[in-house]
Image: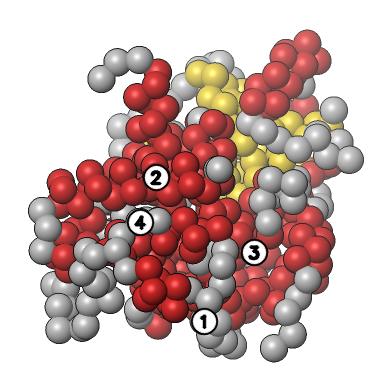
């Protein structure tokens, strides 16, 4: 097959097959991945969604069990309680974080990247953190999308060792660090951030620690702190 | 049942986009029955449908800022999220033996204008364009959209090899698109 004509038609058919749902599992996964990166394909899918939506009156409404909203809200709005464990070098790290406020020029360069991430320019400020460590081997840039409750990442350098993961921690003042989760290394590099944490962005510090695969088993950092960055507002 | 105006749902979604939890709860109250109906019909399993519904609303919360009323009608967006969650789950399941005792809703491959006219009372664009396909193909499209039939299932129900099904369904979908865009 050659020429953009057939690819266009293929994509149109694929978008329809995806929307009506007939694609086998592996193809569906592959297509979903393409959607993340291809706005034209997303537009095709959107059109098919609208066309097929006209069949939707055939879906009869059914009241769901009453406890479901509670479960959804628990997932979105409540932070798991983390046990407080003295993190010895924290004072040093906070000093390091404040001292390592990145040059504004570097951060301005991030703005192009953040536009590509399709972040909303919020009516409020944009919050970012430039995380780096003592030896400079791990460097990660993080930008908050406050309207979506997300933290988008770009790893500039560094990677976890074999069977280890990078875990990201949100530190507010002297409160115990709160895990945002293991940093995904493939696919969309973003983590969710609860509203509660978003409200203390102005005074927060982010840190990355070296943890076993899957993250700390204790709910607190167990491994070496690899990078720290103070959250700043543009 | 009180139908909520689309503009109201749009407004709720835009409030959810800025983190308004009360609007999220209201959106759930207004739309969860429809979305649960979607998940149930596709997954045909109560507890799976419940999980798909939860995942759908998590997606709604997280992606609300991506919804643009100019590009999407709100219920279409919400239903697409619920359907996608459900189909993702369905396709990831281990293959289950198809219950062929269930009467197939897919009829013979004869164009049947009178029956088609009776079947669809709503003369929406999609229904009109589906009428231009044969009954069998129109039913396949409906079956996939409403009940989540995969190519494998369509192939088994119609006793047609899977490659043949795929070829004519893709052609039917292209024809459908041409009709819809006239």
Residues at marks 4 and 1, CA–CA distance in whole angstroms: 25 Å
User: Horizontal and vertical percent for residue A117?
Assistant: 63, 31
User: Horizontal and vertical percent for residue A189?
Assistant: 52, 36
Mark 3: few, some, or many residues within 10 Å (few <14, many ≥20)?
some
- Looking at the rendered structure, whether the residues under marks 4 and 2 are on a common chain is answered as yes
Residue ID at (42%, 27%): A8
Q: Secondary structure at mark 2?
A: helix
For the residues labelled 4 and 1, say whether their Cβ atoms are less than 8 Å apart: no
With B74 as the anchor, is B165 left or right in this view? left
Closer-to-camera residue (B140/B178):
B178
Give the labeled residue for mark 2. B175
Closer-to-camera residue (A45/B159):
B159
Closer mark to the observer between disc 2 and disc 3: 2
Q: Secondary structure at mark 1?
A: loop
Closer mark to the observer between disc 4 and disc 3: 4
Where the C terminus of chain A falls, by quadrant? top right
Residues at marks 4 and 2, CA–CA distance in whole angstroms: 8 Å
């Amino acid at each position: 097959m050659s020429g953009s004509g057939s690819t266009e038609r293929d994509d149109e058919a694929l978008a329809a097959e995806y929307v009506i749902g007939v694609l086998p599992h592996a193809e569906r996964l592959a297509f979903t991945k393409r959607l993340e990166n291809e706005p034209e394909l997303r537009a095709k899918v959107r059109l098919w969604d609208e066309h097929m939506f006209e069949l939707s009156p055939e879906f009869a409404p059914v009241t769901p069990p009453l406890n479901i909203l509670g479960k959804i809200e628990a997932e979105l709005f409540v932070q798991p309680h983390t046990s407080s464990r003295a993190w010895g070098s924290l004072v040093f790290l906070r000093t390091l974080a404040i001292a390592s406020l990145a040059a504004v020029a570097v951060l301005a360069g991030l703005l192009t990247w953040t536009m590509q991430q399709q972040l909303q320019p919020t009516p409020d400020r944009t919050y970012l953190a430039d995380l780096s460590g003592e030896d400079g081997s791990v460097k990660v840039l993080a930008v908050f999308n406050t309207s979506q409750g997300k933290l988008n990442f770009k790893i500039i350098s560094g990677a976890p060792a074999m069977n280890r993961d990078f875990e990201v921690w949100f530190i507010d003042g002297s409160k115990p660090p709160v895990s945002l989760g293991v940093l995904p290394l493939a696919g969309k590099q973003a983590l969710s951030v609860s509203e509660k944490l978003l409200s203390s962005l102005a005074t927060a510090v982010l840190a990355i620690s070296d943890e076993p695969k899957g993250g700390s088993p204790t709910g607190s950092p167990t491994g070496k702190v690899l990078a720290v960055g103070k959250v700043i507002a543009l | 049942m009180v139908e909520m105006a689309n503009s109201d749902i749009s407004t709720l979604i835009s409030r959810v986009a800025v983190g308004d939890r009360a609007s999220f709860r209201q959106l759930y109250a207004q739309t969860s029955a429809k979305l649960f109906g979607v998940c149930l019909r596709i997954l045909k399993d109560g507890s799976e449908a419940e999980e798909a519904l939860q995942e759908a609303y998590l997606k709604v919360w997280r992606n609300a800022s991506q919804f643009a009323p100019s590009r999407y009608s709100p219920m279409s967006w919400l239903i697409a999220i619920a359907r996608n969650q459900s189909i993702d789950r369905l396709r990831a399941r281990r293959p289950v033996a198809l219950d062929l005792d269930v009467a197939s809703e897919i009829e013979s491959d004869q164009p049947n204008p009178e029956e088609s006219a009776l079947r669809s009372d709503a003369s929406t664009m999609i229904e009109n364009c589906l009428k231009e396909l044969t009954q069998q193909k129109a039913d396949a499209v409906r079956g996939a959209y409403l009940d989540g039939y995969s190519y494998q299932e369509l192939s088994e129900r119609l006793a047609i090899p899977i490659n043949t099904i795929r070829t004519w369904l893709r052609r039917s979908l292209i024809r459908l698109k041409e009709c819809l865009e006239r």
